[in-house]
Amino acid sequence: MDQDAFNMSLRKFLKKVGITAQREIEQAVRDAHGAGRLGDGEVLAAEARITIAGVDLDVVVDGRIELA
């Protein structure tokens, strides 16, 4: 395995995940806030799952997103 190629590919994938997730979360929160479903001081429970079938990886990362 070419470690450098693997690391670059992994970083590229994670960057894509991060950018896409941030964009989608921001839009969903804006929409919910605009519709009155969220208050200004809300704390949202968040969960992300990454799966890679070829290595049987299934990892869940959880956290909180604070709006104020």
Image (tube, grey):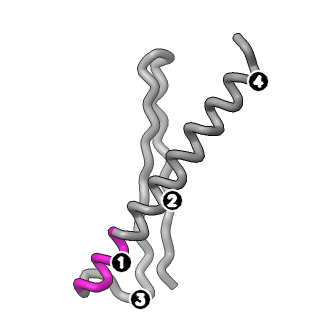
First in residue order: circle 4 vs circle 1: 4
| Residue density around tag 4, few if under 14, some if 14–19, many if 20 or more, within 10 Å | few
Amino acid type for the residue under numbered disc 4:
Asp
Residue at 42%, 69% in the rendered image: 26
The residue beneath circle 4 is 4
Amino acid type for the residue under numbered disc 1:
Arg
| 3 and 2 marks in contact (CB < 8 Å) | no
| 4 and 1 marks in contact (CB < 8 Å) | no
Amino acid type for the residue under numbered disc 3:
Asp
Q: Which mark is residue 40?
A: 3
Q: Is residue 61 above or below residue 63?
A: above
| Closer to us: 45 or 23 | 23
Looking at the rendered image, the disc whose residue lies closer to the viewer, 4 or 3, is 4
The residues tagged by marks 4 and 1 sit, at their Cα atoms, a distance apart of 39 Å
Amino acid type for the residue under numbered disc 2:
Gly
The residue beneath circle 1 is 30
| Closer to us: 64 or 55 | 55
Highlighted magenta segment, given as a residue range: 28-35
Looking at the rendered image, the disc whose residue lies closer to the viewer, 1 or 3, is 1
The residues tagged by marks 1 and 3 sit, at their Cα atoms, a distance apart of 11 Å
First in residue order: circle 4 vs circle 2: 4
First in residue order: circle 4 vs circle 3: 4
Q: Secondary structure at mark 4?
A: helix
The residues tagged by marks 4 and 2 sit, at their Cα atoms, a distance apart of 30 Å
Residue 27, image x, y percentages: 36, 69
Residue 45, image x, y percentages: 41, 64
Picture quadrant where residue 40 is located = bottom left
First in residue order: circle 3 vs circle 2: 3
Looking at the rendered image, the disc whose residue lies closer to the viewer, 3 or 2, is 3
